[in-house]
Amino acid sequence: MLIPDNFDKKNNNQLRLDQYNFDKEEEISRVAEEYNDSSIWIRTRNTGDKSDMFVCAEYYITENEKNNSGEVCGYLQDKDLTVLPHFHSSSDSTVDNTGKILAYSATFNVNFKGKQYTEDTESVTESEIAQKQKQAEVDKIAESIHKDIYAKNLFGLPTTGKHIKEHVQEITKDNVIEVMNEYYKKSGDDNESLVEGIFQEFGLSAKDRANMVQHIESCLLERYKSMGVYVDDIEASIKKEIKYQKDKIGLMDTSFLDRINTKLEHRYDGLQMFQRVIDADENINNPNYQGRTGDCWLLSAINEIGNSPKGKQIINDSIKINSDNSITVHLKGVKKTYTFTQEELLGSTELSTGDMDIRALEKAVERYTIDYYHRDINGNNSAYAYEVLLGKDHIEVCRFSSMRKKGNGLDKSYLKKINDPNTICTAGTPKISKSGNPVLFTTPEGTEIFSNHAYSVVRCDDKYVYLINPWNNQKEIRMGFKDFKNTFDYYYNIRL
C-alpha cells in the first residue's frame, strides 16, 4: 500500500483502512516504522458475543498528543493480530437477570510484531450497539432513495432509480423519522423533504408517487401514535390531501403535507411540556399562551375580541358545551359550525395552552381554512380572523410603512379610535429587521418586540400604546407612541 500524498500527521489527517485496503500486518508495520515518533495503539471494541472485533490503530504524536492526534481505523481479522482478552472483575460489568452482559469494560493485551500492547476498553452497551446499527441502516436507506431520485442515465439525463419502490418499502415506523431527517440533510441547499422528492419525481406515475408517499405517511402516523400523539384528525387530512394531489393535473404540491408532518412534530413537542388546559366555560377569560403554531394573527384577534363587551357576547354565542363534553363552535363570519371531542382538543398540543375555549376557536378556524383554502393556520393576518369570526363588514386596514413613505406619519387621533370599547384592533410587525435580528425593539421595562408577529392593541393615551402579546395574554406591554409607529408595520381594526 502507498501512503497517500496528502497524509500529514501534523494536520490531524486520517487514513481509513477500509478505503485503502489497509488490512495486512506488514502495512501496519510500515506506518509504524515511517512514523517512528508515534506509538501504534490497538483499540478494540467487543459486542459481547463475538470474537471478531473492530480494531482501531490510533497514533499519537509524541510532541503534542492532544492537538496532533489522528486515527487509522478499519476492520482487521484475527489472522493479522493476536488478541488475548482479559476481562475485569464482574463489578465492572452490567448484567441483567438472565446473566447476559449488557455493558462492560475490558482489558485487551495485543501482541504486535513481538511487542505487547495493553489498553482498557470503554464501556459498550447493547443500546449503543443497536443505535449505531440503526443509524447505519437509516443512512443506507436515505442514501439509496436520494440516489434513486437524482439518478441519471447513460446520456447524463435525469431518470429514476429502478429500485426506488423497494427502497421506500424499507421505511418502517421505527426508522421513518430518522430517514426523513437524513434525506433532508442530504438534499443540502435544496432543503428538499423526502415527500417533496418523491412527489415531484417525473419518472414515476402519479399512482406510484401517491402510493409511496402514503406508505411513508402511514409509517409516520404509526410512529407518532406509538409515542402518545393524537393523530386521528391528522390521518384524515393526510388521506384527503394525497387523494387531492393524485387526482390533480400537473405537478404535485407537497407544501401542505410538509406542514402536516411538522404539526405532528409540534404535537409531540407539546406532549413533552406541562400543558395546563382550563375546561371550557363558553367564555375566553382565562390565561392563555400561544403554542407551536404560527397563529399569532388569530390569537391576537381572539384576545382583543374578548376584551370588548360586544365581542365577548359574540364569543359566548359561538361556543357551546354539549352533554358529552364535546364542544361545538359556530363561526359567525362564515356561517360554519364544527364540533370537536375532548380527546381531539386535548390532543391538539401544537395549539395554544390555557383556555380550552380559545383552543376550540383555533381548531374551528383551522378546519374551515383547510376545507376552503387548502392550507393550515400557520401565517395569515388578523383581517382574515375578523372575517371568519365576525364578518367582513367595517374592517379597516392601516399600513404604517405606506404612510411613512408618503411622509404622512400617523396621527394620534387616528389610533385613539381603539379606545372605543367596541373597536377591535391588532397590530403586526414587519417580517424581519434590516439587521436580521428578530428583536425589533426593547421597551424600557425590558420587554422585546419581535418581527413577523401580531399583537392585540388594547388602548392608548397621549404618551403610550398598550399591547398584549399572544405568548401571554395576561401581560400588558407599554410602548411610547413614536416607538410604536416606528416599530409596527400595520394594524387592523373593526368596529362591532
Image: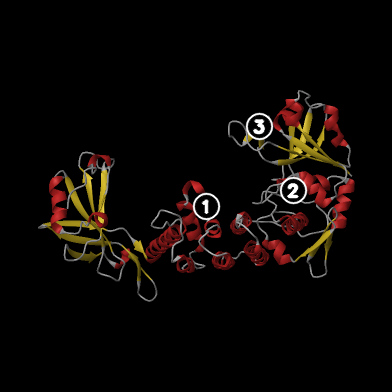
Whichever of labels 3 and 2 marks the residue nearer the N terminus, that label is 2
> CA separation, marks 2 and 1?
31 Å
Q: Which residue lies furthest to the bottom in this view?
A: 98
Badge 1: residue crowd in 10 Å (few <14, some 14–19, many ≥20): some
Compared with 398, 342 (above or below) is below
3 and 2 marks in contact (CB < 8 Å): no
Residue 396 locus on image (x, y percent): 83, 39
Residue 336 locus on image (x, y percent): 82, 59
Q: Disc 3 marks which amino acid?
A: Thr
Label for residue 481?
Answer: none
Mark 1: secondary structure: loop
Mark 3: secondary structure: strand
Residue that carries the numbered disc 2 in the rendered image? 299
At a point 58% along the width and 57% down the height, the residue shown is: 265
> CA separation, marks 3 and 1?
36 Å
Observer able to see residue 114: yes
Label for residue 192?
Answer: 1
Residue that carries the numbered disc 3 in the rendered image? 442
Observer able to see residue 272: no
Whichever of labels 3 and 1 marks the residue nearer the N terminus, that label is 1
